């Protein structure tokens, strides 16, 4: 039995706090009928629910990647246990083959040989320049290298059948729940005709598509590098999986960081007006007037100096990268709260003139109580819309910032660092296209799903802005 | 009106001072000049003397805010804040790490930046407003639906993809224009056409959707019903009534970025090797040239504030309610 | 007949279904005639107008029937041809002049458009015509005003511009959709006069859409009453006002508050209009009808036509005196003795600074309330009457210290209120509560009714433990006529009238001695308004609570006020007991206000005093007597000095130089 030590990175804590907050919010929504009815509208939106299903898959990957530990090194008995420097996550453990089976350098998707010629000693023929066989990709084929297509196709088919069976099981459970207490088959029929209040049809179709793509892909990834390998021979699929967490953290934690400040200052400025409003407006005009990228650049540069001059703060590289990621979230948060703050201020100005607020004032209800009971709940839809709308923008921004060199730590896998590392490869002859394509495609799916979901949420909460 | 503009200008001063203080705090208080020197020199070669020399060369060896040793006004002027931050107000940005005068460099690089940014801006505005107007005109039709789908898809694609994909396809595979570089004179268009095109395309998604929402909001207003009740054809309703009113919110978002066009685009310029301010900034970031980054932050906020004032002025042009009050 | 509407059915697409909002209505209008479509909100009267113009909103659908004008069927016309009719031979004016004009185009441009489109007129000819049009609708200095923008016009002037736009195409039919609902009563009188004059000059037909029986009496030649998407009664003006036949029409008349009903309960129409999605198969009014018979619920009545008076009802006994059915018993003792003063306001001023220029210096003040004194006696109702912008709402808020008064004193039972803070202000507020105008904005949509009512009780620590609290709330809800279960429901589940009841319950929860009612019924339909007025009267007689009733509606005042104070530009110009002010008004403004109200009677159109112009801005009130620019009796002294108040009787007090 190998011992291990649980590592709690700061970002892990925040992520799980977010999950807890999400669950808490869910409970609150279920208990508040007006909120529940708005979320029911989201649930009835087919596009919204399909994209939510996709997002959920991404979140699942991200969560698995947010449980970190360090493996105990084998030491002499009696000695204090030493732990490996490398911090691993549950996701790493689940996809160990992907993580460990590194080739020497570039190889194409489903390739059995490297992408570059090397000089090898062939017994009997002396040294020859040829494309060497991969250490892992297609190893099980041995000499039958030309059968890749047939072998992969057959494996994919088997996996597809399995995926279908799995989907049937899920769909069966869902239909049972939907048609609970009715004649057998009613559930199926109602889902099929789209008569359910919740868009189960969209969820099931999306799930079917996802399973049909994901299961064969992972099955094949045990034998091939399905997305190829990069310059140092690492599996691209593994990098994509690891990038998901970075994207999610940037997209979610940033909003979380700026949310309290934007909400508090926005409401206070709008409610109290006068000099409080003047001061808050001054602050956000000043912050707003510095072009975002430059402010981020300046702040990140300074943060880098702090990190570089204090190496003693971090016991592992993962911790350093993690802290830099969080710092980036904070910086992005500080530069992006002004928009939401201004929006909330304007809305509070309108709300405070409403008659139910004045009614509360005539009862002598204290200002803070009015803010919490009357104003905040009636601003929640704006906050929720801002949260989901910002997410996609932040994921895209991460890629750009990492490219510019002011993003996440270069050692941290993210869509941005992947693109940054791969962009020079387009200049090679023959061209190395798979890293970039995979990163862009994965990012596109994530952002598209987030955008569509954001639209569904906005439509449900704010029917005006269709 | 004039008093209004003057007041806006006066209001800009405390904001610029705030910007200055923030950048000063960021560059000199969060990290001391000693930290910067250590970082720049590299950890291995660092000695107290080297740090002193590095600081003296750049004028960072003075006290930060108050120079107690100096007399008279020099208490305030012989400081890092005054020399490095306050003097930016008069256009003195100091020297970059390579010893060149930053102000002159900025002047030289504005041209190429503008050559890319201005056509991108004008063409982009034209394309997106036209597209959005068309979508709003055919609202609730299949054309509108698929147009919006296209917009959402386009805004979900990373800006990097447009650049990398465009360069690869047009320059490398089709070999239509050079992949990067910049030349003066009439030949410049060959270098400019691709970045401009990519800049326009990458902005279509989000801008079109935004403008479309604005147009649709106007379509639902009472005065539009009045215009229809007059028997005006739908085209006239759109171009005379809706467009004029929709311009007001559109201006808020658009005019403010016009001055910022001088700053160029970080991504486009660095990918296409355009010697503008954007690539200057990126190079400075990569070389950790603090003086240049600081100057760009300052110029950026000045231009932003100019943009705000221009926005206010442009309001008075399109909105009679403001013009006459 | 010029316009004939035949079995017109209009609906709205809601999801996959189409709900009929107008269900088979037929009527016709002759040249030079005014036909009024009368009905409460949601009855489909505006949709009918939009359907005739083919200006339905995007979700609107024409489901059947026909509209023909001068023999041309309009509904089958291609859209391009229809545009020649719209704005040309038929024109429309709308309820909200403020939003119906394009804010960024000059008035000239907006009128010129029509001239160009329909008459092919441009250049100097068009300008000349525009000047003429503006002059016709009573706009002074038309040459200059052509180049002005809508925001430079006052509300009534905007509506005149709208009318000028409508007239520009020389229409034969003018559709006026609630043309005066958003305007003050003195301005309304001007606009109605204008419409009558223009009709006489041009021989136009007018289709008037309104909910106001008074406007109908003033304007219409024939009247059609709509209920839940159907016409239920069509009659000539004389027949309609002398003998309304449909139970719904009769109920509408009886629900109107009026001097003659002082002290009596108003007849109310129970229940609500059925929703579009659940229209009953039989008579649509059956559920609320006092004359309901079994046949009413089974089959929809057919038209019965007698001497140009058609009615759609199963009940035939039209001869019975209408008042026999309603409860006309006395419920309030109007002779409440004047006890000790409860609230005294002396020289109250609320000024809002106007800041301008480089340094945002205060260059002037909006004198919303400018030296107002009044006293409220326990158990009595003081009505504060005035037109929009006179500062009456500000008075209510200043009394509650929601807006800090600039000057003056507010004494509550001898205790000064101005400047109180914290706990002492809170305990003082317990004695005064407010009911607001908009029942939709005055309840927080995110709280349950129970939480809404409990808010005041909590804040002022009225009741202790949870059980007794719930009992108190239940008792309050019963008192305002709502079921006890309402405690656990949300505001959106209630109709406008029910929400206003909740607001009353919330105010009563802290057992105040004074309720400030700020236009509590102006957002409600007549039948619902009657319910709320009845409720307020009942509560007053039961609880002895005093009301400060802020309103612009004299009918409501006549019905329930003991005392009346008339406000103009931040000051009270006349006050006294209700009978005195209503029967023998002394101030020219009060006289004009009273005569401007269109009365829902045949002899209603007897108004003699017409005020010119509109209320000036309180930022820059006229010198001397504020009213002199509009006053028909203005003298030199009026321009230089504000009149001191004069006691006409022991209770009536007037500020006017006309009085000795």
Image: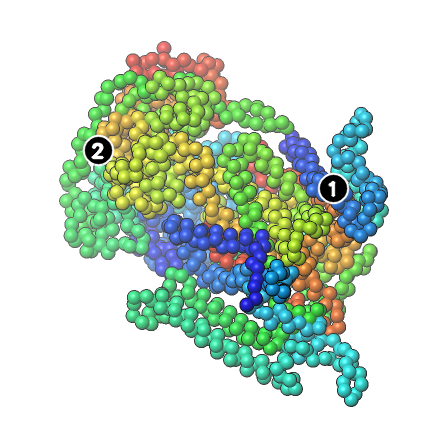
> Does C456 sit above or below residue C353?
below
Q: Taking the image as drawn, is residue A230 in sight?
A: yes
Q: Nearer the viewer, residue C315 or C132?
A: C315
| Residue C392 can be seen, yes or no | no
Which label is found at residue B32? 1
Q: Nearer the viewer, residue B91 or C469?
A: C469
Instruction: Judge left or right: residue C228 versus residue C617.
Output: left
Task: Name the residue rendered at 36%, 58% in the picture.
Answer: C18
**Residue ID at (40%, 24%):** C424
Indicate left or right for A360 with A287 as reference.
Answer: left
Q: CA distance from mark 1 to mark 2?
A: 82 Å
Query: Residue C393 occupies which quadrant of the picture?
Result: top left
Read off the residue under disc 2.
Answer: C265
Q: How busy is the neighbourhood of tag 1: few (under 14 within 10 Å), some, or many (20 plus)? A: some
Q: Residue at x 14, y 40 (%)?
A: C320
In the rendered image, which quarter is residue A168 located in?
A: bottom left
Please determine whether, in this image, residue C152 is positioned above or below residue C363.
Answer: below
Q: Position of residue C60 (x, y in %)?
A: 40, 55
Q: Is residue C579 left or right of residue C350?
A: left
Residue B217: % across, % down? 50, 49
Chain of the residue displaying label 2: C
Write down the quadrant of residue A165 in the picture.
bottom left
Q: How many marks?
A: 2
> Which quadrant would the C terminus of chain C be assigned to in this image?
top left
Callout 2 environment at 10 Å: few (<14), some (14 to 19), or many (20+)? many
Q: Are marks 1 and 2 on the same chain?
A: no
State whether residue C629 is above or below residue C122. above
């Amino acid at each position: 039995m190998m011992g291990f030590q649980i590592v709690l990175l700061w970002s892990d804590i925040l992520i799980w706090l977010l999950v807890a907050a999400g669950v808490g919010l869910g409970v609150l929504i279920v208990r508040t009928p007006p909120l529940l009815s708005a979320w029911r509208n989201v649930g009835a939106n087919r596009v919204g629910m399909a994209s939510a299903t996709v997002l959920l898959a991404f979140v699942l990957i991200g969560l698995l990647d947010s449980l970190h530990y360090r493996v105990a090194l084998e030491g002499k008995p009696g000695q204090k246990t030493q732990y490996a420097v490398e911090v691993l996550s549950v996701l790493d453990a689940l996809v160990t083959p992907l993580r460990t089976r590194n080739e020497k350098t570039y190889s194409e998707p489903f390739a059995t040989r490297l992408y570059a010629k090397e000089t090898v000693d062939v017994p009997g023929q002396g040294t020859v320049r040829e494309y060497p066989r991969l250490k892992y990709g297609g190893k099980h084929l041995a000499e039958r290298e030309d059968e890749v297509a047939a072998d992969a196709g057959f494996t994919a088919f088997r996996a597809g059948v399995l995926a279908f069976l799995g989907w049937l099981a899920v769909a069966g459970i869902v239909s049972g729940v939907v048609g609970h207490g009715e004649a057998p088959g009613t559930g199926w029929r109602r889902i099929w005709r789209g008569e359910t209040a919740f868009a189960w049809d969209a969820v099931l179709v999306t799930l079917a598509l996802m399973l049909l793509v994901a299961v064969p892909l992972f099955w094949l990834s045990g034998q091939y590098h399905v997305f190829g390998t990069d310059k140092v021979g690492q599996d691209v699929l593994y990098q994509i999986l690891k990038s998901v967490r970075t994207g999610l953290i940037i997209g979610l934690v940033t909003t979380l960081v700026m949310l309290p400040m934007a909400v508090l200052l926005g409401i206070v400025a709008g409610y109290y007006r006068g000099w409080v409003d003047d001061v808050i407006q001054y602050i956000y005009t000043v912050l707003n007037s510095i072009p975002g990228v430059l402010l981020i650049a300046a702040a990140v540069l300074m943060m880098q100096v702090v990190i570089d001059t204090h190496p003693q703060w971090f016991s592992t590289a993962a911790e350093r990268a993690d802290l830099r990621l969080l710092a980036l979230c904070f910086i992005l948060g500080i530069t992006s709260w002004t928009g939401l703050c201004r929006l909330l201020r304007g809305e509070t100005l309108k709300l405070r003139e409403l008659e139910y607020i004045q009614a509360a004032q005539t009862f002598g209800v204290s200002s803070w109580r009015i803010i919490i009971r009357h104003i905040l709940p009636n601003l929640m839809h704006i906050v929720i819309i801002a949260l989901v709308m910002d997410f996609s923008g932040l994921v895209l921004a991460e890629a750009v910032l990492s490219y510019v060199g002011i993003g996440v730590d270069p050692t941290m896998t993210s869509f941005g660092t992947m693109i940054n590392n791969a962009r020079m490869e387009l200049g090679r002859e023959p061209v190395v296209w798979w890293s970039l394509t995979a990163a862009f495609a994965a990012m596109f799916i994530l952002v598209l799903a987030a955008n569509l979901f954001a639209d569904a949420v906005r439509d449900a909460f704010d029917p005006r802005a269709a | 009106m004039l008093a209004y503009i003057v007041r806006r200008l006066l209001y800009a001063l405390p904001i610029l001072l705030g910007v200055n203080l923030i950048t000063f705090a960021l560059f000199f208080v969060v990290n001391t000049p000693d930290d910067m020197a250590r970082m720049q020199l590299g950890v291995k070669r660092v000695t107290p003397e080297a740090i002193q020399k590095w600081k003296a060369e750049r004028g960072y060896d003075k006290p930060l805010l108050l120079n107690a040793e100096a007399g008279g006004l020099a208490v305030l002027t012989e400081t890092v804040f005054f020399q490095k931050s306050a003097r930016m107000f008069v256009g003195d940005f100091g020297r970059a790490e390579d010893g060149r005068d930053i102000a002159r460099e900025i002047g030289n690089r504005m041209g190429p930046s503008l050559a890319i940014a201005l056509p991108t801006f004008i063409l982009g505005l034209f394309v997106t407003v036209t597209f959005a107007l068309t979508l709003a005109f055919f609202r609730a039709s299949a054309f509108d639906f698929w147009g919006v789908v296209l917009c959402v898809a386009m805004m979900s694609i990373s800006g990097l993809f447009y650049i990398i994909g465009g360069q690869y396809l047009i320059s490398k595979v089709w070999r239509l224009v050079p992949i990067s570089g910049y030349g003066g004179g009439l030949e410049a268009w060959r270098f400019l056409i691709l970045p401009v095109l990519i800049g326009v395309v990458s902005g279509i998604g989000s801008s079109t959707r935004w403008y479309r929402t604005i147009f649709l909001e106007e379509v639902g207003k009472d005065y539009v019903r009045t215009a229809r009740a007059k028997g005006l054809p739908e085209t006239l309703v759109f171009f005379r009534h809706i467009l004029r009113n929709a311009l007001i919110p559109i201006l808020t978002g658009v005019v403010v970025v016009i001055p910022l066009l001088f700053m160029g685009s970080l991504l486009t310029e660095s990918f296409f090797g355009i010697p503008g301010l954007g690539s200057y900034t990126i190079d400075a970031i990569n070389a950790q040239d603090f003086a240049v980054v600081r100057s760009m932050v300052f110029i950026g906020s000045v231009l932003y504030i100019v943009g705000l004032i221009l926005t206010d002025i442009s309001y008075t042009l399109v909105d009679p309610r403001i013009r006459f009050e | 007949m010029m316009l004939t509407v035949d079995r017109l059915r209009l609906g709205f697409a809601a999801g996959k279904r189409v709900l009929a909002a107008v269900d088979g209505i037929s009527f016709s209008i002759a040249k030079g005639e005014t036909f009024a479509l009368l009905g409460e909100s949601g009855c489909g009267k505006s949709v009918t107008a939009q359907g005739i113009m083919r200006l339905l909103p995007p979700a609107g659908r024409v489901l059947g029937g026909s509209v023909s004008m001068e023999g041309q069927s309009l509904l089958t016309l291609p859209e391009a041809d229809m545009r020649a009719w719209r704005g040309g031979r038929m024109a429309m004016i709308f309820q909200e002049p403020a939003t119906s004009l394009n804010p960024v185009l000059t008035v000239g441009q907006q009128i010129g458009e029509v001239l160009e489109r329909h008459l092919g007129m441009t250049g100097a000819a068009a300008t000349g015509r525009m000047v003429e049009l503006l002059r016709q609708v009573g706009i002074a200095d038309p040459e200059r005003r052509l180049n002005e923008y809508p925001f430079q016009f006052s509300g009534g002037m905007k509506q005149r511009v709208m009318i000028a736009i409508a007239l520009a195409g020389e229409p034969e039919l003018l559709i006026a959709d609630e043309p005066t609902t958003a305007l003050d009563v003195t301005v309304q009188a001007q606009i109605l006069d204008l419409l009558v004059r223009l009709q006489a000059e041009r021989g136009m037909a007018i289709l008037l859409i309104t909910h106001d029986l008074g406007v109908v009496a003033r304007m219409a030649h024939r009247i059609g009453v709509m209920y839940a998407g159907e016409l239920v009664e069509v009659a000539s003006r004389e027949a309609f006002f002398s003998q309304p036949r449909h139970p719904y029409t009769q109920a509408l008349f009886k629900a109107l508050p009026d001097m003659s009903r002082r002290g009596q309960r108003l007849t109310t129409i129970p229940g609500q209009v059925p929703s579009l999605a659940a229209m009953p198969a039989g008579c649509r009014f059956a559920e609320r009808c006092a004359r309901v018979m079994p046949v009413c619920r089974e089959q929809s009545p057919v038209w019965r036509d007698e001497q140009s008076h058609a009615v759609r009802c199963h009940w035939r006994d039209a001869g019975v005196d209408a008042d026999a059915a309603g409860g006309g018993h006395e419920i309030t003792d109007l002779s409440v003795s004047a006890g000790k003063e409860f609230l005294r306001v002396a020289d109250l001023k609320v000024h809002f600074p106007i800041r301008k220029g480089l340094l945002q210096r205060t260059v002037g003040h909006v004198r919303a309330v400018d030296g107002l004194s009044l006293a409220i006696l326990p158990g009595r109702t003081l009505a504060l009457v005035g037109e929009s912008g006179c500062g009456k709402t500000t008075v209510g808020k200043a009394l509650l210290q929601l807006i800090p008064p600039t000057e003056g004193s507010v004494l509550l039972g001898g205790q000064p209120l101005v400047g109180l803070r914290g706990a002492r202000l809170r305990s003082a507020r317990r004695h005064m509560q407010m009911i607001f105008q908009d029942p939709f904005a005055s309840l927080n949509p995110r709280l349950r009714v129970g939480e809404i009512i409990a808010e005041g009780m909590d804040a002022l620590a009225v009741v202790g433990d949870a059980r007794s609290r719930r009992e108190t709330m239940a008792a309050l809800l019963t008192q305002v006529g709502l079921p006890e279960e309402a405690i656990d429901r949300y505001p959106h589940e209630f109709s406008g009238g029910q929400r206003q009841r909740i607001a009353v319950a919330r105010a009563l929860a802290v057992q105040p001695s004074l309720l400030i009612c700020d236009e509590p019924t102006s957002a409600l339909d007549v039948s619902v308004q009657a319910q709320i007025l009845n409720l307020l009267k009942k509560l007053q007689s039961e609880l002895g609570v005093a009301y400060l009733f802020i309103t612009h509606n004299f009918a409501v005042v006549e019905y329930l006020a003991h005392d009346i104070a008339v406000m103009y530009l931040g000051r009270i110009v006349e006050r006294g007991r209700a009978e005195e002010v209503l029967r023998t008004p002394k101030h020219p403004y009060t006289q004009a206000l009273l005569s401007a109200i269109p009365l829902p009677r045949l002899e209603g159109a007897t108004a003699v005093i017409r005020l010119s112009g509109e209320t000036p801005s309180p930022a820059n009130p006229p010198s001397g007597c504020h009213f002199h620019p509009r006053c028909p009796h203005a003298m030199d002294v009026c321009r230089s000095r504000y009149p001191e108040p004069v006691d006409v009787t022991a209770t009536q007090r007037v500020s006017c130089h006309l009085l000795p």
